[in-house]
Image: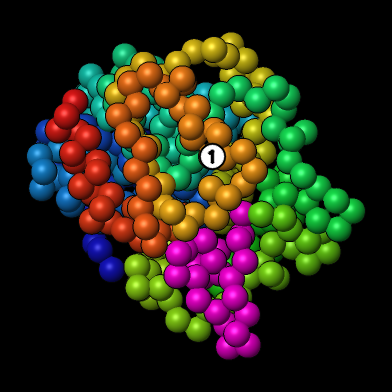
C-alpha cells in the first residue's frame, strides 16, 4: 500500500479530498469508476520526483469529497467547474489535466471548455469523442433480457443496492474483471467484461467471478483502501455520473464542432475490453480531427482498463515525457 498525503480543499462550492505531493507546475489527476484518488498512487510520487505538483482529488461523490444529494449536480459542467475551482484554490494559473476512464472524459472536456486553464491533456482509456447524433441512452443496446451497463445504472438505487451489499466483493470482481490479468474463481469461471451487457434479472455482478487471487498490480492492502473509501461514500456519487449522460449531451450541444486546441496525448491498454466496442477504433482514428495537437496514441501491451495501476512505469514515462515537451 502507498501512503498518500491528503488535505481538504474548497472548490466550486464543495469540499474536495485531494492527495498531493511535489512542487512545480500543476498536474491534475482524475480517476475513474469505481476508483478514487488512490488509483494514482504510482503517478503522484513519480511526478513529484520529476519536478511537478501532482494533485489527485476524490471526484465529487467519491471517497472523502462532498456528495451532493441531487443527481443533476454531477454533470460534466459541474465536474469541469470543480477542476477550475481547484486551480483557483491552489493559486495556479493553469495545469495539465490527466484522466483515466470517467476521468478521461472529464479531462477532455476540461481542455475543450477551458484551454486558458488547462494547457495540456492526457486521456487514458476513453478517447475524445464528438457530439453523438442523439442522447446517449438512445444509442446503447438492450434486449428483453439484457441491457447495456450504462442503462442498468440509470435507475436510482438499483445498482447501489447490488454493489453495496458486499463492497469488498463488488470491487474485487469489477477491478479484476477489467484487468488484463482477470483470473478465474474456484469453479474456473473466467472473467467477463463488467462494462458490457447486464442481465435484467441477475444484475451486473452475477456474471463476474470472484477471483481466488488478486492481480499483481492490486495488493490486498490496495483493495482495502478502496473498500474503506466506498464504505464512506457508497456508489451513488459515481453512478450519478452515468445518470447525467443525456443531460451532458443537452448541455454540450453548445460546444458541438469545437476542437481541443491544446497539446494532447492518448494512452490505452491493448487488452482493454472497452476498445472492442463497435466503432471504437474509428473513434480513435478520428481523434486528430477533434484534437489537432494530439501528439501520440500509445497502446500498452498486456494492459487492461486500469492503465495507470496495471502499467505504472510505462504510464509515468509517457506522462512525464509529454509534460517535458510542452
Q: For residue 224, which quarter of the picture?
A: bottom left
Q: Is residue 206 left or right of residue 209?
A: right
Q: For residue 92, which quarter of the picture?
A: top left
Q: Which span of residues is magenta-colored? A: 171-195
Q: Is residue 181 magenta?
A: yes
| Percent of width and height locating residue 270 | 44, 54
| Percent of width and height locating residue 139 | 74, 35
**Secondary structure found at label 1:** helix
Name the residue: 35% across, 73% down: 216
- Assess disc 1: are there few (<14), some (14-19) or many (≥20) residues with their C-alpha within 10 Å of its C-alpha: few
| Vertical relation: 192 (above or below) 139 | below
Name the residue: 47% across, 58% down: 271
Name the residue: 63% across, 70% down: 208
| Vertical relation: 285 (above or below) 319 | above
| Percent of width and height locating residue 100 | 42, 44
Residue that numbered label 1 is attached to: 281
Q: Pick whichever, 163 or 316, lies toward us.
A: 316
Amino acid at each position: 500500500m502507498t501512503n498518500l498525503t491528503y488535505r481538504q480543499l474548497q472548490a466550486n462550492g464543495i469540499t474536495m479530498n485531494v492527495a498531493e505531493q511535489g512542487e512545480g507546475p500543476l498536474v491534475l489527476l482524475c480517476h475513474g469508476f469505481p476508483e478514487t484518488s488512490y488509483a494514482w498512487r504510482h503517478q503522484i510520487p513519480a511526478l513529484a520526483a520529476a519536478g511537478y505538483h501532482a494533485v489527485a482529488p476524490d471526484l465529487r461523490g467519491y471517497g472523502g469529497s462532498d456528495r451532493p444529494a441531487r443527481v443533476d449536480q454531477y454533470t460534466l459542467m459541474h465536474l469541469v467547474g470543480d477542476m477550475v475551482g481547484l486551480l483557483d484554490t491552489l493559486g495556479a494559473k493553469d495545469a495539465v489535466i490527466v484522466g483515466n476512464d470517467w476521468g478521461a472524459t472529464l479531462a477532455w472536456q476540461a481542455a475543450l471548455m477551458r484551454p486558458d486553464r488547462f494547457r495540456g491533456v492526457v486521456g487514458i482509456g476513453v478517447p475524445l469523442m464528438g457530439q453523438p447524433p442523439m442522447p446517449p441512452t438512445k444509442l446503447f443496446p438492450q434486449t428483453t433480457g439484457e441491457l447495456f451497463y450504462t442503462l442498468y445504472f440509470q435507475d436510482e438505487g438499483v445498482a447501489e443496492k447490488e454493489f453495496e451489499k458486499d463492497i469488498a466483493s463488488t470491487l474485487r470482481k469489477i477491478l479484476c474483471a477489467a484487468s488484463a490479468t482477470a483470473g478465474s474463481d474456484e469453479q474456473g469461471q473466467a472473467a467477463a467484461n463488467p462494462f458490457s451487457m447486464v442481465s435484467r434479472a441477475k444484475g451486473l455482478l452475477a456474471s463476474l467471478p470472484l477471483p481466488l487471487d488478486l492481480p499483481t498490480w492490486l495488493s490486498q492492502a490496495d483493495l482495502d483502501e478502496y473498500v474503506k473509501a466506498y464504505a464512506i461514500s457508497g456508489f451513488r456519487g459515481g453512478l450519478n455520473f452515468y445518470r447525467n449522460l443525456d443531460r451532458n449531451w443537452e448541455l454540450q450541444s453548445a460546444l458541438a464542432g469545437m476542437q481541443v486546441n491544446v497539446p494532447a496525448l492518448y494512452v490505452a491498454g491493448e487488452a482493454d475490453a472497452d476498445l472492442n466496442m463497435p466503432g471504437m477504433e474509428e473513434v480513435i482514428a478520428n481523434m486528430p480531427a477533434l484534437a489537432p495537437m494530439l501528439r501520440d496514441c500509445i497502446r500498452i501491451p498486456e494492459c487492461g482498463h486500469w492503465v495507470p495501476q496495471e502499467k505504472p512505469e510505462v504510464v509515468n514515462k509517457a506522462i512525464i515525457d509529454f509534460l517535458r515537451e510542452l
